[in-house]
């Protein structure tokens, strides 16, 4: 019986594939590109984005597509490198890309947006949070919070919940994501009931030994250490802090999402770590539960915030495209002109926020949330 069911499923899948192909040849398809790190140190972000984007595209296609047309999604690897991201963008242009869901990380996104604005290519980044990711022109929007918004929201959350009176910060001064968050965190801290007693920087050339930064944080009496950095460096900081007997509260932003999946990292050291994020996989609402179950079934892993951003991103493109009334026979520039107007007219209920709207400068309006790592899992707060 199982063999017969598998055979029937294979026939059904083949029939659906032929139907979609025939439809594409007759009516056209929207070509949506994706750019992000599928390999390298931040691959966990890119893989999550591309998996969830493809899952959303498949769902949209199965439900009739966008304005009756199917989506073809083409993900490209940039290894979180700006030059490689531009190469990936040019590859997608040669393929016939009409809209871009990407890039995933900030520095590559800044480089690609410089190209996209010249082409008047519609760009929606799920997770590029540096201000410059969408500031070059009026063609670009984002799903996630910007770095300034993350920094400000983190300071407010720490202050409003009275998590600490003395806070230290360890940040990457060579990274736009990290410095953008830090600068606004420090500015907002002055309005909150805590003091930044140490602000210690590192760079891309010195991100393996954090003993000096941790010692200064410890000596300053910091009860909480704010980490506006990525999960790889955070895993080293947590390990080294434990080794020196320093046990403050650790608080980060979306860059820490992925901490529990670092190879060789003792996840027990992450217990109690808090991070600002718009998505928690254990949230009890029906949309989140359905998304998580489907993602786990397809990819064998629990989705992170980047996956949720991308999933929302594909549905945001659908909502704006339907509002704009675009069709696949339009060129990328004409599509962009229509999409950037429609983005300011739509309201989207997604995994990462309810009633999300966008300003003309591409920024989303939605409420921040926080999660804590408990028993080896992200738990909504």
Image (cartoon, rainbow, N blue to C red):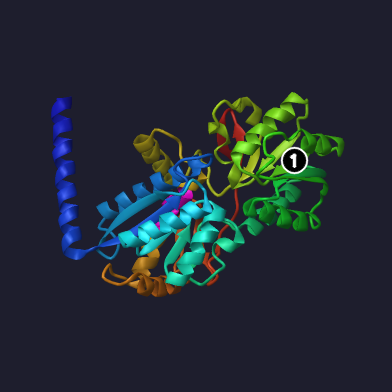
Residue at x 71% of width, y 34% of height: 209
Residue at x 18% of width, y 42% of height: 13
Query: In the rendered view, does 108 fall on the left or right side of 252?
Result: left
Was residue 92 drawn as part of the magenta stretch in this picture? no
Q: Between 87 and 188, which is closer to the camera in this rendering? A: 87
Give the magenta range. Answer: 308-315
Q: Is residue 231 visible?
A: yes
Residue at x 34% of width, y 67% of height: 322
Was residue 311 drawn as part of the magenta stretch in this picture? yes
For disc 1, the marked residue is 225
Return the x and y of residue 123 as percentages of the image width and height. Answer: 45, 63
Image position of 361 with respect to 317: above or below: below
Query: In the rendered view, does 143 fall on the left or right side of 247?
Result: left
Q: Between 111 and 378, which is closer to the camera in this rendering? A: 111
Q: Is residue 370 visible?
A: no
Image position of 343 with respect to 12: above or below: below
Return the x and y of residue 169 as percentages of the image width and height. Answer: 75, 45
Image position of 242 with respect to 101: above or below: above
The crowd level at tag 1 (other Cα within 10 Å; few <14, some 14-19, many 20+) is many
Residue at x 17% of width, y 48% of height: 16
Quadrant containing the N terminus is top left
Magenta: main secondary structure equals: helix
Quadrant containing the C terminus is top right
């Amino acid at each position: 019986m199982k063999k017969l069911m598998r055979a029937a499923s294979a026939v059904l899948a083949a029939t659906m594939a032929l139907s979609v192909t025939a439809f594409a040849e007759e009516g056209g398809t929207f070509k949506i590109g994706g750019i992000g790190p599928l390999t390298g140190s931040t691959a966990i972000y890119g893989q999550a984005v591309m998996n969830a984007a493809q899952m959303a595209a498949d769902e949209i296609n199965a439900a009739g597509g966008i304005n009756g047309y199917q989506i073809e999604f083409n993900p490209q690897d940039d290894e979180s490198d700006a030059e490689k991201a531009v190469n990936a963008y040019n590859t997608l242009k040669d393929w016939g890309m009409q809209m871009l869901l990407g890039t995933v990380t900030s520095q590559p996104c800044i480089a690609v947006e410089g190209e996209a604005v010249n082409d008047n290519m519609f760009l929606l980044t799920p997770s590029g949070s540096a201000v410059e990711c969408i500031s070059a022109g009026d063609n670009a929007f984002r799903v996630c919070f910007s770095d300034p918004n993350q920094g400000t929201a983190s300071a407010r959350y720490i202050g409003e919940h009275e998590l600490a009176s003395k806070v230290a910060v360890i940040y990457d001064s060579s990274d736009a994501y990290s410095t953008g968050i830090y600068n606004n965190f420090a500015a907002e801290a002055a309005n909150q009931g805590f003091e930044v007693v140490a602000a210690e920087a590192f760079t891309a050339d010195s991100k393996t030994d954090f003993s000096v930064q941790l010692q200064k944080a410890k000596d300053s009496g910091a009860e909480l250490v704010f980490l506006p950095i990525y999960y790889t460096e955070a895993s080293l900081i947590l390990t080294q802090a434990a080794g020196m007997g320093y046990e403050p509260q650790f608080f980060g932003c979306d860059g820490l999402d992925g901490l529990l999946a670092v190879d060789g990292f003792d996840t027990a050291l992450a217990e109690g770590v808090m991070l600002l994020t718009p998505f928690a996989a254990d949230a009890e609402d029906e949309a989140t539960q359905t998304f998580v179950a489907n993602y786990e079934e397809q990819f064998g892993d629990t989705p992170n915030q980047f996956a949720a951003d991308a999933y929302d991103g594909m549905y945001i493109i659908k909502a704006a495209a339907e509002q704009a009334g675009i069709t696949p026979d339009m060129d990328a520039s004409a599509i962009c002109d229509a999409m950037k107007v429609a983005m300011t007219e739509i309201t989207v209920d997604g995994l990462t926020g309810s009633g999300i709207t966008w300003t003309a400068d591409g920024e989303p309006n939605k409420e921040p949330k926080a999660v804590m790592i408990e028993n080896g899992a992200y738990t909504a707060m």
